Structures are given as C-alpha cells and as structure tokens.
Amino acid sequence: MARRRAELIVQVQNGLISVQEVARRLGISRQTYYKWEQRALQAMIKALSNRHHGRPAQPIDREKEALRRQNTQLQRQLQVMEQARRIHLAALPPDKKKE
C-alpha cells in the first residue's frame, strides 16, 4: 500500500493526476493526502542527505587499546634488541661468530 501511495504522490508531483483524484482513489481527504505528501518529501530529503561513509565508530574498548599499545611497545623493543644483536655479532671476530 505504501508503494502505491508513493506512486500516486510522484504522479501528482509530475502533474499527471490531481490531488482530488488521488484522494478519491484512496478514500481519503485532500488534507490527509497533503500530510502524506509532506511526510514522503521529508523522508526523501532525509534519505538523500549526505551521510558518513564506512562503518560507524565502535565504542572504545580500553583493555584492547592498552594491549595494542603494549604490543606496539614490545615490538619496538624487539626490533631494538635484534638490531643490537646484529651489531654485536658483526663486531665479533670471525672465529667467535655463531648464529
């Protein structure tokens, strides 16, 4: 029924049918038609307005964020330690190098 109402509102907007004819076909008053038309146009404007793209923001999980920060910090420490190990191995005499 909503689709039929929408079709009739579009026909009125395009001048293909009169409000009186729509009201007669649907068994409603012209006042009711104008209320429906106003709601339909407002809904169309809302549906076509700009929206944010992508997923909506997720609530912040403080525990997850703390674990992410800790993970990042540990990854950096590991990189520093690996680099120090490579430097240490490079400084050793050839006969002492065992990887």
Image: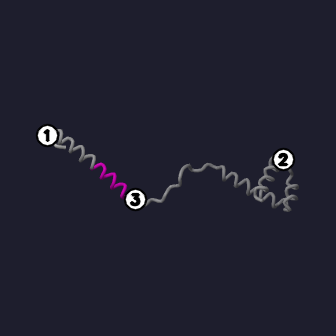
Q: Which residue is mark 1?
A: 92
Q: Is residue 22 magenta?
A: no
Image quarter in which the N terminus is found: bottom right
- Which one is earlier in the sequence, the residue at label 2 or at label 1? 2
Image quarter in which the C terminus is found: top left
Type of amino acid at the residue the image marks with label 3: Lys
Q: Secondary structure at mark 1?
A: loop
User: Which residue sits at x=70%, y=55%?
Assistant: 43
User: Which residue sits at x=81%, y=49%?
Assistant: 11
Q: Is residue 69 magenta?
A: yes
Percent coordinates x, y for residue 98 in the rendering:
16, 43
> In the rendered image of this protein, does residue 14 appear above or below residue 29?
above
Q: Which residue is mark 2?
A: 15
Type of amino acid at the residue the image marks with label 1: Leu
- Which one is earlier in the sequence, the residue at label 3 or at label 1? 3
Q: Which residue is mark 3?
A: 64
Residue in the foreground of this view, choosing between 98 and 52: 98
- Rendered image quadrant of residue 38: bottom right
- Rendered image quadrant of residue 40: bottom right
Report the mark closest to the observer, 3 or 1: 1
Crowdedness of circle 2 by 10 Å Cα count: few (<14), some, many (20+)?
few
Type of amino acid at the residue the image marks with label 2: Gly
- Relative placement, left or right, of 20 versus 76 is right
Report the mark closest to the observer, 2 or 3: 3
